[in-house]
Amino acid sequence: MKAVPIFQVDAFADEPFGGNPAGVCILPVKKSELWMQNIAREMNLSETAFLFKQKSHFNLRWFTPVTEVELCGHATLASAHILYQFGHLKPDEPARFQTLSGLLSAEKEGKVIVLDFPAAPERSASMPAGLKEALGITPKYVGINKFDYLLELNSESEVINLQPDFERLKQVQSRGIIMTAHADGEKYDFVSRFFAPAVGINEDPVTGSAHCCLGPFWSKKLDKKILTGYQASERGGVVRIEMKENRVRLGGTAVTILKGEVLV
């Protein structure tokens, strides 16, 4: 079998070993879902992206170690970064991806890559069974969108110090749980964390798709179209957000850590 190039990229990171690591696999021919899932399990990162070139775009799919997901921001950023870095796209050429969430695009603006994603605003919701017990807190607000629950807490420190019971959290019927609060100081507008044990990720370091919900939420609360969010995981990462009607533009940088080949 022909070797398949694969990369590991730290997305939403200015330096190595920060942000969120993603696998990026560029396929010379289409591969089965089972093959992609096995590679994602082997990579054991929060997501591995698989790209297959079409005439005017790339087919793009994302897999956690245990399942395929409908939308992933950091692995899309990582994919665009690899396409630009290794000459698959010219610096002034937009990246176009056909995905389970429709057509997505990315463009390079200096060192920053900007993703154009659909907004995924939340609506008010009740606390689902087991969530309060899993988190050990009472939120200020509970919302839900097509993917996740969003919980607003009273302070940045409450978000940072949260220690969920992941076994209990795994039982909550949702892809993930977004925790957020207004940021202290003026460097960031808000902070967040993202838990998704139901899809094999206890805590995701930096979650682009969660900011498709966080962007509209904080834009409305703060009456701002341009925001900066900090995801306060152990690795941490900064996401720049610009609201454009029903779209969210997510900006970030990325660093390539590994380059190799899949031989099976």
Image (cartoon, grey):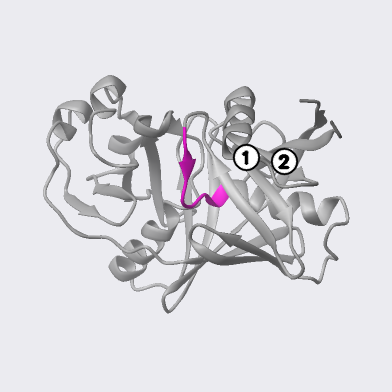
Indicate which label's residue lies in the foreground, 2 or 1.
1
Q: Is residue 92 above or below residue 237?
A: below
Tell me the residue at 33%/29% (across/down): 161
In this image, 86 relative to 64: left or right? right
* Residue at the limit of the structure toward the bottom, as seen here: 245
Tell me the residue at 54%/52% (across/down): 73
Q: Secondary structure at mark 2?
A: strand
In this image, 223 relative to 49: left or right? left
Q: Are marks 2 and 1 in contact (CB under 8 Å)?
A: no
User: Can residue 23 be found in the magenta stretch?
Assistant: no
Q: For residue 45, what is the image quadrant?
A: top right
Tell me the residue at 78%/54% (across/down): 83
* Quadrant that contains the C terminus: top right
Q: Please state which of residues 14 and 148 is positioned toward the viewer in this rendering.
A: 148
Q: Mark 2 and mark 1: span between their CA atoms?
A: 13 Å
* Quadrant that contains the N terminus: top right
In this image, 238 relative to 80: left or right? left
Q: Amino acid at mark 2?
A: Cys
Q: Amino acid at mark 1?
A: Ser
* Magenta stretch in the rendered image: 67-74
Q: Please state which of residues 188 and 61 is positioned toward the viewer in this rendering.
A: 61
The numbered mark at residue 25 is: 2
x and y percentages locating residue 61 in the rendered image: 58, 49
x and y percentages locating residue 55 in the rendered image: 77, 68
Q: Is residue 19 visible?
A: no
Q: How many neighbours does mark 2 have within 10 angstroms: few (below 14), some (14-19), or many (20 or more)?
A: many
Question: Mark 1 highlights which residue?
Answer: 32
x and y percentages locating residue 243 in the rendered image: 46, 72
The numbered mark at residue 224 is: none
